[in-house]
Image (tube, coloured by chain):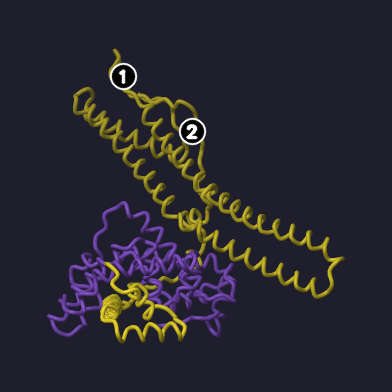
Chain colours: A purple, B yellow
Amino acid sequence: MKDRSTAQPRGEEASWIRASQKGDTTAFNQLVLKWEGTVFNLALRMLQDTEEAEEVSQEVFLSAFRNIGRFQLRSRFSTWLYRIACNKCLTRLKRSSREKRVPWEEGFSNGIPGLSLVGGQEKLVWEQERRARVTRAISELTPEQRAVVELRIYQDRKFDEIAEILEVPSSTVKSRFYASLTVLKDRLAPLASGF
Amino acid sequence: MSTQCPYQDQISSLLFEDLDSSLRAEYEGHLEGCLVCRQELERCRQTLEALQSWPEGPVPRHFFVSDSGANLGLSSAISMLSPVWKGALAAAALLAVTLLATFASGLHVSASSRGLTVGWAPPEPAPVFDEESFQQQLVLALEQRLLLREQQLLERVRQELSQLEGSLDRKQQASLKSAVDGLQGRLETQLDAQLLDVESGVDEVALAVHSLSELQSRALQLLNQRIDLIAIGGEIQGSQSDLLINTLIEMADLRERNPARIEGEMK
């Protein structure tokens, strides 16, 4: 898994941040280019809705730009950005928990993006089925559990950093993660043996 | 799942945690002789593999921030409000809905010897609500309040320390200065977190504003339907109905721009 920023910002990222803190949108957009893939995919996995993920990603970067004056360069930029992104997603999830959601994969009548390059029709179908199962399994988690799974599994963050991002004790993070794992194992573990 | 081995619930930490070498060695040693834990670990690996089969896709578009986009718009302004101010905003929205409802309820149709009369009398003059100015004032007030609180706290700490300085040696003074700097850092972090926390409520208020807009549309729609029903009932002629509808729409537009300009009654 990637680990693009595990320490305080250095080099060009630090200079982009300093310039952004003076209101330089060009410099800030360099940060956007670097992190938009991470933020969008995080939002997509948590919200399971492409349109909402786009909206949230835009909100995250606008929010980051407006608040970047308060960012301390001694901290990790990724931690700060993940905090904004997770907060935005959690808010959306909590709001929409009362609404019926259309499963993410149903939004693609022509297949799921990124799978068209998988060779062979049979394998494509299997991949789609597997993706659908992963989507359904994640949708069974609470918003807080999704955030922890996203940060631990997909963003490869350690439990202590996740605790910092979500502003909860590390023990809470672990408890949420292992509770999620119990659900996910029941739904996904049979996949490897061909379900 | 029932636990069949005391290690079973902890064994997945081999995959997800930085275990110290002795604990790792203990778990790995246990695994060699425990089928239950080997199966459990394999299930965890399969789960992880399934989850990681969801690769990162390309972004559908860039999320660049423009100079104009960086300015405070309605939703961003709301996003910076504290829960208290959001409550105030929600109250303002409710007030607007109430005013609209009052407007609708003030409409009346009566028959007289001169024919059909449609009238509307405002119960009281409607206040002009400048939304943009209101938002800006709220945001300013919020920021000032938070910053003031931080400054006041730091000032109090410094005052306490200045009284102590005479009785402290250099080392103690340096130590205290370092502690105060640390406190300042923590306060800034807290302030940052507070603002981010406040932002998380943006959608709730934005939703309320959206609902308000829908209610306004619905109210206008109902007004038009009501006039249509009168026309269908044959109480007034078709041409009069059109005139009436147009007049009502104009009246609603006028009210949106400047409620004071609406005349109390029309025939």
Q: Chain of mark 2?
A: B
The percent coordinates of residue B174 (x first, y second) are 78, 73
Tell me the residue at 28%/72% (across/down): B4
Q: Is residue B37 left or right of residue B120?
A: left
For label 2, the SS is: loop
Say whether residue B54 is visible.
no
Q: Which comes sooner in the sequence, label 1 or label 2?
A: 1
- Crowd class of label 1 (few under 14; some 14 to 19; many from 20; radius 10 Å): few
Q: Residue furthest right?
A: B166
Q: Is residue B220 above or below residue A138?
A: above
Q: Is residue A116 left or right of residue A72?
A: left
Q: Amino acid at mark 1?
A: Ser
Tell me the residue at 40%/35% (across/down): B100
The quadrant of the image that shows the C terminus of chain B is top left
Q: Is residue B189 left or right of residue B243?
A: right
- Crowd class of label 2 (few under 14; some 14 to 19; many from 20; radius 10 Å): some
Q: Is residue B105 above or below residue B111?
A: below
The percent coordinates of residue A176 (x first, y second) are 39, 65
Query: Is A38 in front, or is B261?
Result: A38
Instruction: From the image, tell me which residue sits under label 1.
Output: B110
For label 1, the SS is: strand
Q: Label for residue A95?
A: none
Residue A17 sits in quarter: bottom right
The percent coordinates of residue B101 (x first, y second) are 39, 33
Instruction: From the image, tell me which residue sits under label 2.
Output: B126
Discs 1 and 2 lie in a common subunit: yes
Query: Is A151 in front, or is B72?
Result: A151
Query: Is B57 in front, or is B99?
Result: B57
Residue B161 sits in quarter: bottom right
Q: Chain of mark 1?
A: B
The residues bearing labels 1 and 2 have C-alpha atoms spaced at a distance of 24 Å
Say whether residue A35 is visible.
yes
